[in-house]
Amino acid sequence: MIKENAKISMAVIRRLPKYRRYLSELLEKGRERISSKELSELIGFTASQIRQDLNNFGGFGQQGYGYKVEELYKAIGKILGLDHSYNTIIVGAGNLGQAIANYTNFDKAGFIPIGMFDINPKLIGLKIRDIEIMDADLMGDFIKQNKVDIGIICTSKEKAQSVAEVMATNGIKGIWNFAPTDIQAPSDVVVETVHLSESLYTISFLLKHHE
Amino acid sequence: MIKENAKISMAVIRRLPKYRRYLSELLEKGRERISSKELSELIGFTASQIRQDLNNFGGFGQQGYGYKVEELYKAIGKILGLDHSYNTIIVGAGNLGQAIANYTNFDKAGFIPIGMFDINPKLIGLKIRDIEIMDADLMGDFIKQNKVDIGIICTSKEKAQSVAEVMATNGIKGIWNFAPTDIQAPSDVVVETVHLSESLYTISFLLKHHE
DNA sequence: TAGATTGTTAATCGATTAACAATC
DNA sequence: TAGATTGTTAATCGATTAACAATC
């Protein structure tokens, strides 16, 4: 899929979902083809950048014609690994953990929560949708016995690192971290941290410094 | 605060909260001073970058000595606009909206939710902590009658744009958007969108393309 | 074929890193 | 003072944009 020995920059990777999202909207509207120029006007990237980005993964377009919306949409989905599903677990079943468990958009994209964990006895045994909240002590065994692809950390910042270690030790290769701290993990484990506070502080900065 | 006519890049702005977070940890540990070199080893940015970044806002350090932890922590807080508080409203009182309303870390940083809004009659009238969920139709008036600095959008993607318009029309200057769509707003309104799905898809990509 | 638009190379721009004089 | 470390300029690196030949 990726051109041989090509090194894709994170900047490109993070733009791919946006392409896919706009293509999905075009698809819903019944659009069959689109040029990089028109896509550029929709998304707000330059046409040049769009062509550069896509060409990291091969020539999806046709000269003189543009891109076929459905074909490109599917291709980007495949590049992103959205052509199959992932099992996930959510650790920390507080408000945020429950919100994520209830967010069916992730299911639709193939990210299936198969278990939740917490240390709070009041939560253990409850179900969110049909996902059982289990004792956090059982997490390691659960991961071993089930194919868990992605671990989602919704704990306090104090617990996040040790949770990540249990995940990595038991073979999870992807960690999505919502705890407001940076996490250390082996180099073969992908860690993506969503720093909600940092995003909010950016607004604060921009409000303060006019504009 | 910012050096005259200096243009601060978004890359720099987005690193500031991370500096602040590490300085906060150092402060808790009782550290009084730190050099850019040691901070570099903690955070993982180069010492050179740290000094460059900070010097966008003035000389906080002392040659031969380094930076005073507390002083720098406070200075960055002030640069980020965290030296005063903001009133916020949360629109969409579903799981995510409630999770944000319950997330007291934002309160601690000075972001105070003073109202929530939804269209669901089952939710209207309920309180999350002490924040009342009101009818979404009342949002415009509420904004006019209260000083609302930041509007937080936790609605579906279909409703997000019209909610943003009500916010902007009534004088809100900062929008934090969690709906999975891009929002148009007047140029004097800051919009920060958190694309949770896009963050998740990045993990998927990295899992697929080895490491 | 002529027109349109890609794929790709070259030019530009901006961000990061290195180096070092200034100075505490 | 000598040593350490900043503030800042210069060099490098990488990402974006422009240009255009290839080609549908």
Image (tube, coloured by chain):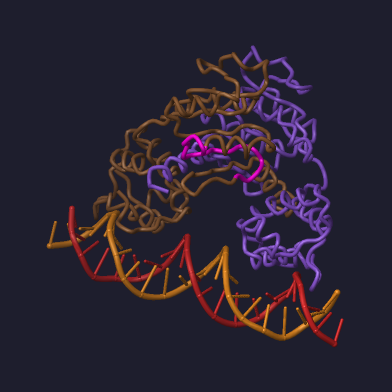
Chain colours: A purple, B brown, C red, D orange
User: Does residue A175 appear in this view?
Assistant: no
Relative placement, left or right, of A156 versus B95 is left
Give residue A206's position: percent from left, percent from top.
43, 45
| Residue drawn where x is 67% and y is 17% of the image | B121
Residue B111 vs A203, above or below: the answer is above
Q: What's the magenta region? A: B168-183
Give residue B75's position: percent from left, percent from top.
31, 42
User: Does residue A164 appear in this view?
Assistant: yes
Q: Nearer the viewer, residue B98 or B26?
A: B98
Q: Nearer the viewer, residue A97 or B141?
A: B141
Residue A70 vs B176, above or below: the answer is below
| Residue drawn where x is 40% and y is 41% of the image | B20
Q: Nearer the viewer, residue B2 or B37?
A: B2
Q: Nearer the viewer, residue B131 or D3?
A: B131
Displayed quadrant of residue A50: bottom right
Q: How many marks?
A: 0
Dominant secondary structure (helix, strand or loop) of the stretch shown in magenta: loop
Please identify the residue farthest to the top as the structure is shown.
A122
Relative placement, left or right, of B146 versus B178 is left
Displayed quadrant of residue A19: bottom right
Give residue A96's position: percent from left, percent from top.
61, 27
Q: Is residue B205 magenta?
A: no
| Residue drawn where x is 47% and y is 53% of the image | B10
Give residue B183's position: percent from left, percent from top.
60, 44
